[in-house]
């Protein structure tokens, strides 16, 4: 589990012949243990290789299908966050690292707008939470198949959201509580129809 407060960005170095996707740490010097969870652009991945300068992960087809990793370019900056502990301040939100879909930027800058499949509309509320490329953000406006967020200069500096232009893909995770509420309502309606 994560909070959506990105530590920094790392550089994607591509997939090796061994199938491992590697990221260069740069100046970031975390303590990463083999088997630990790392959020990479909002995707919960498991460290399978750790060196002083790199960490490596394996990415399965399901992850490639649901995230931007299928088209991630070598050299791209990737937002990273280590998993939280019981002692960690929960500054952002409850983030699982389970990406729901890939959206696209429709407006860039300090007022970022993203478009996504309208089947997710029920999961987005104004002043609620949304996670974009692993960054926990507050929704400022809701449209049909879209949501807007405000980005402060610190967020633009610390993450890769400032690198995105109109049309750029990004990973979206919707609020877990909202997902459970929508699922519960669906089950209740199904039960009502069956009676």
Image (spheres, rainbow, N blue to C red):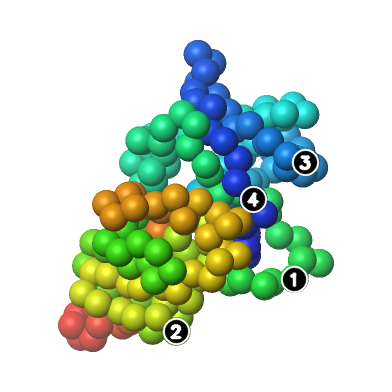
| Residue 80 relative to residue 149: left or right | right
Of badges 1 and 4, nearer the viewer stands 4
Element type at marker 1? loop
| Residue 178 relative to residue 166: left or right | right
Q: Residue at x 81, y 67 (%)?
A: 87
Seen from the viewer's position, the closer of residues 26 and 43 is 26
Q: Position of residue 190 (x, y in %)?
A: 24, 78
Q: Position of residue 11 (x, y in %)?
A: 57, 36
Q: Residues at badges 4 and 3 in contact (C-beta under 8 Å)?
A: no
Give residue 89's mark. Answer: 1
Give residue 29's mark. Answer: 3
Q: Residue at x 67, y 54 (%)?
A: 7
> Circle 2 is placed at which residue position?
127
Element type at marker 4? strand
| Residue 192 relative to residue 99: left or right | left
Q: Residues at badges 3 and 2 in contact (C-beta under 8 Å)?
A: no
Q: Rate crowding at label 3 as few (under 14), some (14 to 19) or many (20 or more) other CA atoms within 10 Å.
A: few
Label 3 vs 2, first from the N-terminus: 3
Is residue 36 something that shows in the picture?
yes
The Cα–Cα distance between marks 1 and 2, rounded to whole angstroms, is 21 Å
The Cα–Cα distance between marks 1 and 4, rounded to whole angstroms, is 17 Å
Residue 72: image quadrant is top left
On screen, residue 17 above or below 41: above
Label 4 vs 3, first from the N-terminus: 4
Element type at marker 3? loop
| Residue 164 relative to residue 157: left or right | left
Give residue 8's mark. Answer: 4
Q: Position of residue 177 (x, y in %)?
A: 48, 76
Seen from the viewer's position, the closer of residues 186 and 191 is 186
The Cα–Cα distance between marks 3 and 2, rounded to whole angstroms, is 34 Å
Q: Rate crowding at label 1 as few (under 14), some (14 to 19) or many (20 or more) other CA atoms within 10 Å.
A: few
């Amino acid at each position: 589990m994560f909070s959506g407060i990105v530590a920094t960005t790392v550089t994607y170095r591509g997939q090796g012949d061994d199938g491992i996707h590697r990221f260069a740490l740069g100046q970031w010097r975390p303590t990463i243990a083999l088997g630990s969870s790392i959020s990479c652009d909002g995707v919960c991945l498991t460290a399978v290789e750790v060196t002083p300068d790199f960490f490596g992960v394996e990415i399965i087809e399901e992850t490639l299908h649901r995230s931007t990793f299928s088209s991630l370019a070598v050299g791209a900056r990737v937002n990273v966050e280590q998993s939280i502990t019981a002692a960690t301040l929960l500054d952002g939100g409850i983030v699982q690292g389970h990406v729901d879909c890939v959206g696209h930027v429709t407006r860039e800058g300090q007022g970022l707008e993203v478009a996504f499949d309208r089947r997710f509309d029920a999961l987005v509320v104004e002043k609620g939470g949304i996670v974009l490329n692993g960054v926990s953000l507050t929704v400022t406006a809701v449209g049909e198949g879209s949501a807007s967020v405000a980005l402060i200069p610190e967020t633009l500096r610390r993450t890769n959201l400032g690198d995105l232009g109109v049309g750029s893909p990004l990973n979206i995770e919707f609020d877990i509580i909202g997902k459970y509420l929508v699922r519960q309502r669906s089950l209740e309606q199904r039960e009502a129809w069956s009676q």
